[in-house]
Image (cartoon, helix red, strand yellow):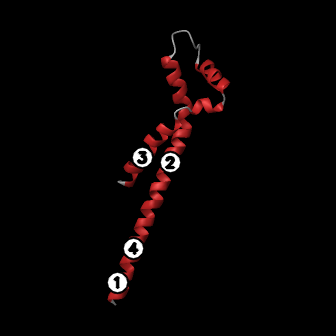
């Protein structure tokens, strides 16, 4: 009887640890998705704010200038933004 209770407790502990690990990975994927969706607009906003007046006429003009470098130009600074969002999502949502 005692052995069965110990086995149940061990299984519950393993299940909760696996659940926590899967939640952490899911929240890092959420952070990656959020970064992928918001990064191009964030890069364009930063370019528009830091450019001298009159450099860009519109957001589309800024987009065209960035895409001349290639599609990777829209994702400059991806890793720092991902690390910031990934850990914030992970810690906030796991603790809820």
User: What residue would you read off at disc 3?
Assistant: 87
**Residue 80 image point, x, y percent:** 47, 37
Residue 12: assigned label: 4
**Dot 3 and dot 4 residues touching (CB under 8 Å):** no
**Residue 30 image point, x, y percent:** 50, 48
Residue at image coords 51%, 11% = 52
Crowd tier of the residue under label 3, counting other residues whose Cα lies within 10 Å: few below 14, some 14–19, many 20 or above: some
Q: Earlier in the sequence, mark 3 or mark 4?
A: 4
Residue 5: assigned label: 1
Q: Earlier in the sequence, mark 2 or mark 3?
A: 2
Q: Is residue 77 above or below residue 60?
A: below
User: What residue would you read off at disc 2?
Assistant: 30
Q: CA distance from mark 1 to mark 4?
A: 11 Å
Residue at image coords 52%, 33% = 77
Asked which secondary structure carries label 4, the reply is: helix
Asked which secondary structure carries label 2, the reply is: helix
């Amino acid at each position: 009887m005692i052995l069965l209770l110990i086995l149940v407790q061990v299984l519950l502990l393993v299940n909760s640890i696996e659940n926590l690990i899967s939640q952490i990975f899911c929240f890092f994927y959420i952070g990656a998705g959020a970064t992928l969706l918001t990064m191009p607009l964030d890069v364009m906003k930063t370019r528009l704010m830091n450019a001298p007046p009159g450099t860009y006429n519109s957001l589309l003009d800024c987009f065209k200038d960035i895409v001349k470098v290639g599609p990777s130009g829209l994702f400059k600074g991806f890793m720092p933004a991902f690390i910031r969002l990934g850990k914030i999502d992970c810690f906030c949502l796991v603790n809820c």
